[in-house]
Image (spheres, helix red, strand yellow):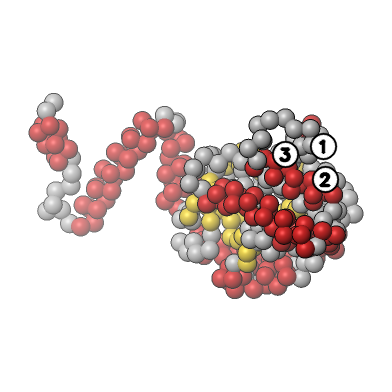
Amino acid sequence: MGVRECCATFLAGLPNPALPFLPALVMGTSFAAFFLFMFYKKYTNLPVKVILIHMLKKIFYLLPTHDHSESETCKNPGCVRCKKYEELKTQIVQKMKEIRANKPEFISQQLEDAVKKIEYESSPFSKCELDDEPKKKKSNLELQKPTLFYMELAANPYWNDFEVYKKELGFLKLNFSIILKDFMSVFNALKNGDNWGWKLNDIDNGHWCIFPFIDQGRMNKSNSQRCPNVSAILEALPSLMKDCVFGNACFSILYPDSHIEPHHGPSNVRLRCHLGLNIPDGCWLEVAGTQYKWKKEETVLFDDSFEHSATFVNQSSSSQATPRAVLLVDFWHPDITSQEKEVLLELLAP
């Protein structure tokens, strides 16, 4: 078939210009959808059912702008977050020089070792074996591997069984209904097409969105104004990690048929808390090989510098497809002293 015949065949399949608008719109949309479907199937080689699910999600869920998670497996060479972490290493080294000169008494051995490791990795000798290279302790089958900043601190994948931050966790649970009300307000707006303030984290399988109140240490004022009660609750948490590039607080939603691949957080100077807001069946968190199933109105406290992942298997009925939703809050590691925190706030300023 030549070009002319091909074009004639294509044009013959288009709606008649004389048709009324509505039938023409339906026919044209159906025609375009069919060709898009065929191209998508040829490109992805996915089963028809999976393609239809993906297309329906794109139609019925208006998802926000892409951002990627803190996974060390980012495939985007121009990623702003990855570039920022490289800049942060330089900032840490430069700030530490100033602190060594002006207030050396504030520097603990753990902090000194943590920065020396970054200095070593940034030096031209980093590929050589040096005797004085700071060594990292092995723990839990070497599953604790923070990607950027490591201090010698107590290491546990889960912290719920330890007497830490009981008041903060209890305070979050006490205010569950207030937090849930704020969440439903912005989530219902998202379902109705208002994606203002939401970010889409880049994962290979499915969709993972966040509505940040603290994003890498910086307060998101517009989101806080939309959820004033949550903002006030966060401000009342004395151990909340803010003004630090590793600190985050957000609503986090994971859609059905999604999987966040195993990865490590950037540092062990924080502990991460999830408060379950909406927990359908078939979703769980896994840290250092141990699964935890979220529960509504319950908190889980874990160290995300350990290898961790999240999964939400597909639900049987698309009409009942609701995302897993949690309030995510980062706290300072309880072993960090007030003096160390003061230094870290300088080293890790956002």
Alpha carbon of mark 1 to alpha carbon of mark 2: how far?
8 Å
Instruction: Please state the horizontal and vertical placement of residue 104, each as a whole percent of the image.
Output: 82, 58
Instruction: Please state the horizontal and vertical placement of residue 350, each as a whole percent of the image.
Output: 63, 61
The residue located at (24%, 48%) in the rendering is 28
Q: Secondary structure at mark 1?
A: loop
Alpha carbon of mark 1 to alpha carbon of mark 3: how far?
10 Å
The residue located at (56%, 65%) in the rendering is 186
Asked if residue 95 shows in the view, the reply is yes
Alpha carbon of mark 3 to alpha carbon of mark 2: how far?
12 Å
Find disc 1 in the rendering and name its residue: 137
Type of the residue with mark 2: Glu
Residue 175 higher or lower than 256, as above or below? below
Find disc 2 in the rendering and name its residue: 152
Q: Secondary structure at mark 3?
A: loop
Tell me which numbered mark, 3 or 2, is placed earlier along the sequence: 3
Indicate left or right for 109 with 329 as reference.
right
Tell me which numbered mark, 1 or 2, is placed earlier along the sequence: 1
Q: Are marks 1 and 2 in contact (CB under 8 Å)?
A: yes
Q: Secondary structure at mark 2?
A: loop
Type of the residue with mark 1: Lys
Find disc 3 in the rendering and name its residue: 145
